[in-house]
Amino acid sequence: MTFDVSRRSLLGMGLLGGGNILGKFLPSKALAQNPKQHDNHFTSSAVHGGSTTVGDVDNDRNGFNPRDILTDWDGGKVSQLPNGQTLREYDIAVEEREIEIAPGVFYPAWTYNGRVPGSTIRVTEGDRVKINFRNKSLHPHTIHFHGIHSARQDGVPGTLEAMPGEEVVYEFDAKPFGCHLYHCHSAPFKRHLHKGLYGAFIIDPDPKRHPEAEQQARSRLLGSSENKQWQEFLMVMNAFDTNFDEENEFYAVNTIPHEFMKRPLRIERDRPVRVYLINVTEFDPVNSFHLHGNFFDYYDSGTTLTPTLRTIDTVMQCQGQRGILEFSFKEHAPGQYMFHAHQSEFLELGWMSAFEVVA
Amino acid sequence: MKKTWLWAVLPLVALVTSIIIFLSTNPLSPLGISAPPLENLTIERTVLGDRAISLLVRAEGSEPMQIAQVQVDGSYWTFTQKPPGALPRLSTAWIDLPYPWVEGETHHLNLITNTGVGFEHTIDVAVATPQFSLSRLWGFTLLGLYVGVVPVGLGMLFYPSLKTLGGEGMKFILALTLGMLAFLLLDTLEEGLKLANSAANAFAGSILVWAIAAISFLTILTIGRSRGKAPEGQSLSTYLSFSIGIHNLGEGLAIGTAFAVGEAALGSLLVVGFTLHNLTEGIGIAAPLVKSKPTFITFLGLTALAGLPAVLGTWLGVFAFSPHWAAIFMGIGVGAILQVIVEVGSYLARTASKIGGTWLSKISLAGFSAGLIVMYGTALLVNF
């Protein structure tokens, strides 16, 4: 592994030179108890002491909004199969388009349905999933789902790979329950994934199949009364290498750097929070999620109904790794609580955010 | 008569027409050229102020360039651009960053354009850029005087002893001057090319230096010989002073910029070195005056002409520096030095023939070598 010295030495520099400064800002800025700040207005008080991208991305032109992506679960076109199984059908098309991945910075992305990350496919354990996949681009593409399925459905080169202009259909049963992802697996793999061909694939547990933990299962099942108590968010940790030197220039959750730092994500204090966290960051071995002033329970891959890690405030994921975070601010004073990668490098290059906890 | 006019104008009209046709028909389209725009960015000045970094950037894109974001030490940072907006080819703008830089440490900047390309700039040693103030100006003036005027003046003090020299001694001194000039020529050329390299590519800096050198050489040579004979005595000394003055402007620039970017840790060594280094210049300027009866005012004028540009150079280097202008000055300097090499050489040849010899002799070889060696040896003290 060779690192570009000029970029890597920044880490050391940042820690030595910026550490002092960081320390000065953290207590006053990040833990500022300012419940009055209800407008989502970009003020300098909301950013990390000058460390921010400048300006705003035109979400309308992009055709997607990182804030909407937090919660726009796509249940597909629902129907019943003769055997009583629920069928969920999706149309997904690959489009090559330029998107604004940071204020004023344009990137020639490859997208599922014109957005990065692609649609959040959310189904229930045991559902039949059918994907009509159209390739409207100039390169071959696939969709490779993380899940349990047959080799014939795997979506790798030579298996259900859609050539330019072609359409293929993927069909499989949704299992296991958890927080998963899908992405392109065509060669060259790294570039196909990095350019934006990825999305979330969430399988809610079917409470009937989990009598031993029915309550937890119900709380995860989208649409149930228990689930409505929760504030659920999808966060896809991604990054962009805008000059193609295999080093990322911009880091974010849901594509746009600093979005939730400039306009913190509002959460109600008295309702629990569940974050579906997925790491698709290319070129860096790991990414991470660190929560300020609080701790969370973590379900690796979301495939269990009891936490795999309890009471942690930082979790690390390699590429393709994902999990579910559960936490509550019930006991806390209202205010801004940061969350970000705990790699300083990623934080300063955009993966820096905050919750605005309101009473 | 009318017809010849027509033949001068017609090609120009045809040229304009052909360019218009080219631009309107776009014959490149069948070649499938729809490449992204070429971009380049040159950072011409770096100013470190009170918890702030300012950069003067010059855009060199095939299309107007847009600076979208700026990283300092791997962190995106708030910045303002004056004037704002896209930067047309060869235009400049100031980028101001309210960044708490650290004294004596290195900082890396990266300017990201709208296409996602990054242009990196390193501040090797962060020190506050000297702000303009009278006391500071006086300090740099003194420095310039020490480096330029004082050594040349001290060299002039050899004048009485030069007068006692015979023909052979004169040959030695003239050859010594030639050796010194040869050193200055290479030194100035090297400095000019170095500056040209750090200037925006569009200015084709190195070619600019060579071209300016050629033009200035021929211009000064023509002026010098406009009376039909080679300059001698006081006028030759004046040309020597002029060319050495431009070289000393370059030395002043180097010292000034070194102070501005915090590299002048040599301080007193630097000044002592330059004093020794430039002493030879005074001897060289005084040599052609041996046959005439110069007044004190003449010596003063020649000293000022050769030395004061060093003061100007330190000012420019510290307070207002752009590499392409400096490169142009160095080009003029190269031409001017070449001109005095030619004239001092012909003076040496004439001196030699008067005493019944040729320009090439053991004495002149010894003098020439001595000139080069003295300059090189003293340069060891000031090369940083």
Image (cartoon, rainbow, N blue to C red):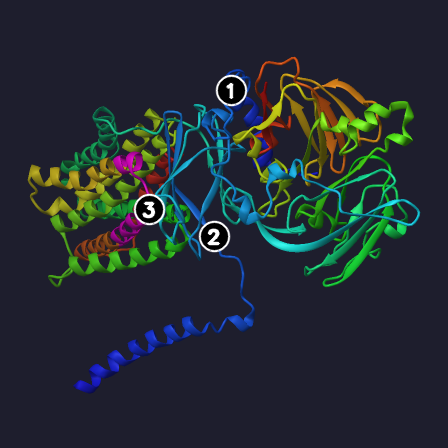
Total marks placed: 3
Mark 1: secondary structure: helix
Horizontal side, residue B69 vs residue B149: left or right: right
Up the image or down, A278 lies above or below B104; here it is below
Q: Are discs 2 and 1 both within one chain?
A: no
Residue A157 as seen in the image, left or right of residue B253: right
- 3D distance between C-alphas at marks 3 and 1: 53 Å
Residue indicated by mark 3: B188
Return the residue at label 1: A29
Q: Is residue B39 left or right of residue A125?
A: left
Is residue B326 on the magenta stretch? Answer: yes
Residue A339 in view, yes or no? yes
Give the image quarter of residue A14.
Answer: top right
Label 2 and label 3: CA atoms lie apart by 31 Å
From which residue to which does the magenta span run? B314-338
In depth, the one of B158 and B201 nearer the eye is B201
Corner quadrant of residue A342: top right
In the image, residue A270 lies at what x, y percent? 66, 18
Q: CA distance from mark 2 to mark 1?
A: 38 Å
What secondary structure is found at the residue carrying circle 2?
loop
**Position of residue B185 measured from the top left corner of the image (x, y, whole percent):** 32, 49
